[in-house]
Image (cartoon, grey):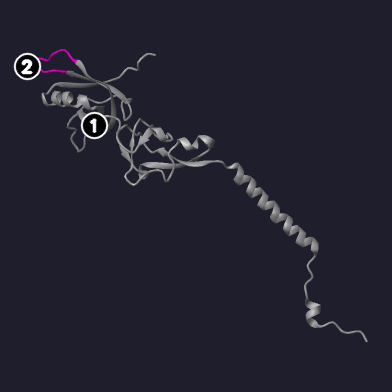
Amino acid sequence: MARRPERAERGALRLDPRLLIGIVLIAASTTGVWALVTGLDDSSEVYAARGTLTPGTRIDADDLDRVSVRLGASADHYLAPGEVPDGGLVVARTVGPGELVPDGAVDTVDRTGLATVVVPSRGALPNALGPGATVDVWAAHRADRDTYEPPAVLVAGAEIAAVQEPEGMVDSGGSSVELLIPREKVAALLESLAAGDVIDLVPARASAD
């Protein structure tokens, strides 16, 4: 007499081998595409300047933006996350807004030999004069109460670090300009300011090659 199949046997599921093979092929295809895309993405994460960085300025990671760009082998030449020490870094040369920060543009110590001096501007500055721009500082020495000597260049090629606009409801005068000048020029400029000389900032002309 034939044995009647048990209920458990009648309800058992039988998987089609073709279904298993299909699942394996789909998983393998997905893994392959992911590996290919990952291999093609050779972008590196480096730092870019959030604003103009001028020589002598100390910066830390919070002053920079992290960007992901494709640089290939040249990625090693740019400042990357994890390379900014706790004490920050000193800017060695001007880096413009949005520009990637090269390793050579920063240092652990200030080697620029520059100092910052604030100079009041007698009038509105041209729009082109902002952080990173270079100016010649002209001074006309006060000869007596009402006369001045012919103006002369006191500091050539000074770089603007920042422009401080007047605050308050009443405009008390022009802007104050933070200038980066060689340390050996600081005494002469401060002496001229203290003497009440007329100081003017004139955009520096690029030297001809």
> Residue 13 bears which disc, if any?
none
Q: Is residue 144 magenta?
A: yes
- Residue 31, position as x, y percentages in the image: 66, 52
Is the stretch drawn in magenta largely helix, strand or loop? Answer: loop
Image position of 94 with respect to 34: above or below: above
In the image, what residue occupies the spot 6% across and 16% down? Answer: 144
Name the quadrant containing residue 13.
bottom right
**Amino acid marked by disc 2:** Asp
Q: What element carries label 2?
A: loop
Other-residue count near label 2 (Cα within 10 Å), few / some / many at <14 / 14–19 / ≥20: few
Q: Quadrant of the C terminus?
A: top left
In the image, what residue occupies the spot 34% across and 47% down? Answer: 86
Foreground of the two, 123 or 133: 133
Residue located farthest toward the left when viewing the structure as drawn: 145
**Amino acid marked by disc 1:** Thr
Other-residue count near label 1 (Cα within 10 Å), few / some / many at <14 / 14–19 / ≥20: many
Which of discs 1 and 2 lies nearer the camera? The answer is 1
- Residue 203, position as x, y percentages in the image: 29, 20
Asked whether the viewer can see residue 121, the reply is no
Q: Name the residue under label 2.
A: 144
**Nearer the N terminus, badge 1 or badge 2?**
1
Q: Name the residue under label 1.
A: 116
Residue range corresponding to the magenta coloring: 140-151
